[in-house]
Image: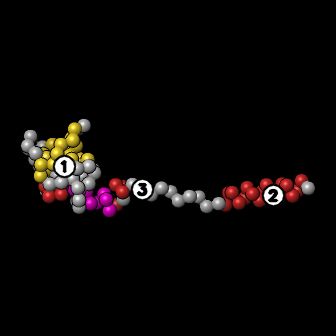
């Protein structure tokens, strides 16, 4: 009688150990290679550089509206570079700004 109980417990543990693990969570869209290579880098002549944050250009902790171009669409998106070619003026964003 004890042998059958031990056998049942051992069998159950074997089944649990052999169960497939759940698939890992897919990586966020920003971490896929297609998204990383799509982003644009800032031109080297920019005096101040920020990053696209939604539909605006974030520099420091402040979001500025895109004066030229857009942070939405092909070649843009969160994390893409945006900035100001000279001190002051409007922000240039990647989609149409450079």
Q: Tell me what residue is drawn at x 75 percent, y 57 percent.
A: 12
User: Within 10 Å of the Cα at label 3, are there few (<14), some (14-19), or many (20+) other Cα atoms?
Assistant: few
Q: Secondary structure at mark 1?
A: strand
Badge 2: how crowded within 10 Å, few (<14), some, or many (20+)?
few
- Give the image quarter of residue 31: bottom left
| Residue range (magenta) | 34-41
Quick one: SS at disc 3? loop
Q: Percent position (x, y) of residue 26?
A: 45, 57
Q: Is residue 23 above or below residue 60?
A: below
Q: Quadrant of the C terminus?
A: bottom left
Residue 46 can be seen in this image: no
Q: Are marks 2 and 1 in contact (CB under 8 Å)?
A: no
User: Gap between marks 2 and 3, in whole Å?
Assistant: 40 Å
| Magenta-drawn stretch contains 1 | no
Mark 2 and mark 3 lie on one chain; the one further toward the N terminus is 2
In the rendered image, residue 41, in percent from the top left (x then y), is placed at 21, 54
User: Are the residues flagged by discs 2 and 3 in contact, CB closer than 8 Å?
Assistant: no
- Which quadrant holds residue 90? top left
Q: Which mark is residue 27?
A: 3
Q: Left of 58 or right of it: where is 30?
A: right
Name the mark on residue 8. 2
Residue pointed to by mark 1: 82
Q: Earlier in the sequence, mark 1 or mark 3?
A: 3
What residue is at 39 percent from the left and 54 percent from the top?
A: 28
Please state if 16 lies on the left or on the right of 90 as rendered. Answer: right
The quarter of the picture where the N terminus appears is: bottom right
Is 36 included in the stretch rendered in magenta? yes
């Amino acid at each position: 009688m004890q042998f059958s109980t031990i056998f049942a417990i051992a069998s159950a543990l074997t089944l649990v150990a052999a169960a497939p693990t759940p698939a890992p969570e897919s990586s966020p869209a920003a971490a896929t290679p297609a998204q990383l290579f799509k982003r644009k880098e800032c031109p080297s002549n920019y005096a101040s550089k920020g990053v696209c944050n939604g539909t605006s250009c974030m520099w420091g902790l402040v979001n500025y509206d895109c004066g030229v171009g857009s942070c939405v669409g092909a070649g843009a998106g969160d994390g893409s570079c945006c900035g100001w070619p000279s001190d002051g003026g409007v922000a240039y964003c990647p989609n149409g700004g450079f």
